[in-house]
Amino acid sequence: MSQQYSEELNNRKFVGRLIYSVLTERRCVREALKLFPDSRDKNIECAYHALVHYEADEDLRYHDFEYKEEQNDYLEFIAETLCAGKELPRNIIADYEDYYKGIATPWAKGIKGFFKEFWRFINVS
């Protein structure tokens, strides 16, 4: 097994556990998002944005119990799949990849981090 595959598998399992910790209210969404690994794995990116969506719908979940249950089941499915090290179904990944690119990561400290984020912000590679 290659080192890259092993790291990807470990990252998926870690993200699955993060989602479970949010669903069981042991961790808030913001805290979980900060702990996401920096990864180009579409499965992890999808899970990241599913949690962002979950946080954005907090008021809707509060007022609509059926929607809350449906969203919790959806996140539980994502967590279960990732904890098993499997790939998410293509249709779930496709739901997010058109609208979001990558995972937001904290700035690196110092002037180098500032300029890296600045150039990324103005879309210069």
Image (cartoon, rainbow, N blue to C red):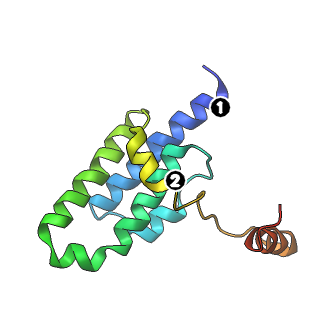
Placement of the N terminus among the 4 image quadrants: top right
Mark 2, residue position: 97
Up the image or down, 26 lies above or below 110; here it is above
| Left or right of 92 in this view: 12 | right
| Left or right of 124 in this view: 89 | left
The crowding category of the residue bearing disc 1, from other C-alpha atoms within 10 Å (few below 14, some 14 to 19, many at least 20), is few
State how far apart marks 1 and 2 are (Cα): 22 Å
Disc 2 element? helix
Residue sticking out furthest to the front: 98
Of labels 1 and 2, earlier in sequence is 1
Which dot marks residue 69? none
Mark 1, residue position: 4
Q: Position of residue 66 (x, y in %)?
A: 13, 65
Q: Position of residue 76 (x, y in %)?
A: 28, 49
Assess whether mark 2 and mark 1 are in contact (beta carbons under 8 angstroms).
no
- Choose between 8 and 35: the one closer to the eye: 8
Give the residue type at disc 2.
Glu
Q: Position of residue 71 (x, y in %)?
A: 25, 60
Placement of the C terminus among the 4 image quadrants: bottom right
